[in-house]
Image (tube, coloured by chain):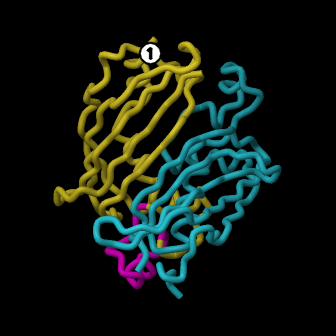
Chain colours: A yellow, B cyan
Amino acid sequence: MTDKNLIGHKTGAYSVDVEKGRLRFFAKAIGETDPVYTDEAAAKAAGHESLPVPPTFLKCLESEGRDVVELLNLVGFDLGRVLHAEQSFVYHKMAYAGDVLTFDGFISDIYEKKGGALQFVVMEARVTNQSGEHIADIRSSLVQR
Amino acid sequence: MSVQFSDIQIGDEIPLLKLQPVNRTTLALYCGASGDHNPIHVDLDFARKSRMDDVFAHGMLSAAYLGRLLTAWVPQSQVRGLSVRFTGITQLGHIPTCSGKVVEKFIDAGEQRVRLALRCANQYGEEKLVGEAVVALA
């Protein structure tokens, strides 16, 4: 069973560059056809500074700055048995290609269900941009089956 | 025409988003683009060692489809929140369909908002994700 003393454990703050090529690759991978997400001229015509970071891509950027396997080891989880249980985003401001986003994360909860057969770890991160503006809060819940 | 708060009724459905069938290429592309390199989604040998019959889709791929559902309906700058719960595994060959229904109209932080109940299901009607979103409307 995962050590409940890890609740509140800070998983560190780190910064990640938002790259245009990566955003286009993501758009391709999810079948996005709205040119706002791939064509800078279309993005600007729609009032954006540059290509927008799509709603769930913040989670991808968050994962980029952290060694997931190391984190799973910390909570005693095995990669082959872990599933994503829940994911949420609260958005405060749009993020764009060219931004440098800082993710400041911590473990917010650890609990079990079904008499310990399912173990849950919840992680949260506050996301800010290079100007210190609050972009979003993200919350991820992982379960070990 | 932009979506207006006054035109929206509780119970309204937003336009559906129907995807292509999920195949191994879909998962390879999402692995690379998302940065989620967990081999369970792309490496059959690893998946079998983990006692799965085959690789299966990233939950966050379907979450991204729900993001597309929202941003096809309103500009992304109006999306205030998105939360999802993964309730089933999307297997190869599944055809995800994303839907959203208005369940609440309210005022928060001085703006008009609606809450949507979201769902992603496969071609057999089996639910894979449920969630909700909060969207600001003029």
Q: Along the line of sight, which residue is nearer the eye, A73 or B78?
A: B78
Name the image quarter holding residue A48: bottom left
On whether residue A50 falls in the magenta region, the answer is yes
Residue at left 28%, top 52%? Answer: A101
When asked about the image quadrant of residue B66, the answer is bottom right
Subunit of mark 1? A
> The magenta stretch spans which residues?
A37-53
Residue drawn at x 74%, y 41% is B91
Name the residue carrying label 1.
A76
Q: Is residue B74 above or below residue B50?
A: below
| Residue farthest toward the bottom in the current orientation of the protein | B1
In the shown orientation, is residue A28 left or right of residue B110?
right
Task: Please state the horizontal and vertical placement of residue A43, each as a whole percent of the image.
Answer: 42, 77
Measuring from the top left, give residue A41's x and y in whole percent: 42, 81
Q: Is residue A58 magenta?
A: no
In what element is the residue under mark 1? loop
- Horizontal side of A130 relative to B51 (left or right) equals left
- Residue A21 in percent (x, y) is at 44, 61
Q: Can you say which quadrant of the picture contains the C terminus of chain B?
A: bottom left
| Residue at (41, 76) in percent of width and height | A40
Q: Label 1 sits on what residue type?
A: Gly
The image position of residue A26, as x and y in percent, is 52, 57
B88 up-or-down from B46: above or below: below
